Amino acid sequence: MSKLNAEERKARDNERFSQRVDERRVKGEDVVAYALANKKAYKFLTKDEKYELKQRQIALQNEVQLTELEKLKLRDEQELEKLQAAFTEQ
């Protein structure tokens, strides 16, 4: 097997990702979820799928921010409880 140059590798990879996205679309699988997991698949999505991907990315980002806020809130509550426990001991 001959070695491929960078341009040939890129063309081969693009063809593979295009085929994978098409196969998933034909099977009725969630191609947007596939694109979320694999960034290279993004350029093979349809316009509607790209829009849905952006919406899901925003939702995931919001979810991450909420969990971070919940962690901070829980940590603050724990610190407050420790301080109250220390204060009541004195």
Image (cartoon, grey):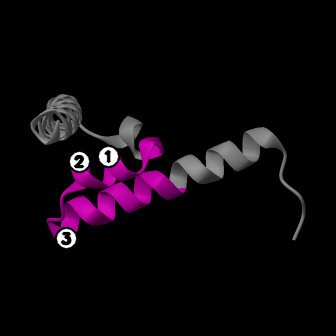
Q: Nearer the viewer, mark 2 or mark 1?
A: 1
Is residue 83 depicted above or below 3 in this figure?
above
Query: For residue 29, what is the image quadrant?
Result: bottom left
Q: Which residue is pictured at 23% across the width and 48% down the height?
A: 32
- Residue type at mark 1 is Leu
| Secondary element type, mark 2 | helix
Q: Nearer the viewer, mark 3 or mark 1?
A: 1
Q: Mark 3 highlights which residue?
A: 27
Query: For residue 25, what is the image quadrant?
Result: bottom left
Q: Mark 2 highlights which residue?
A: 32
Give residue 36's mark.
1
- Residue type at mark 2 is Val
Q: Please tell me which residue lies in front, 85 or 6.
A: 85
Query: For residue 88, what is the image quadrant?
Result: top left
- Residue type at mark 3 is Lys
Q: CA distance from mark 2 to mark 1?
A: 6 Å
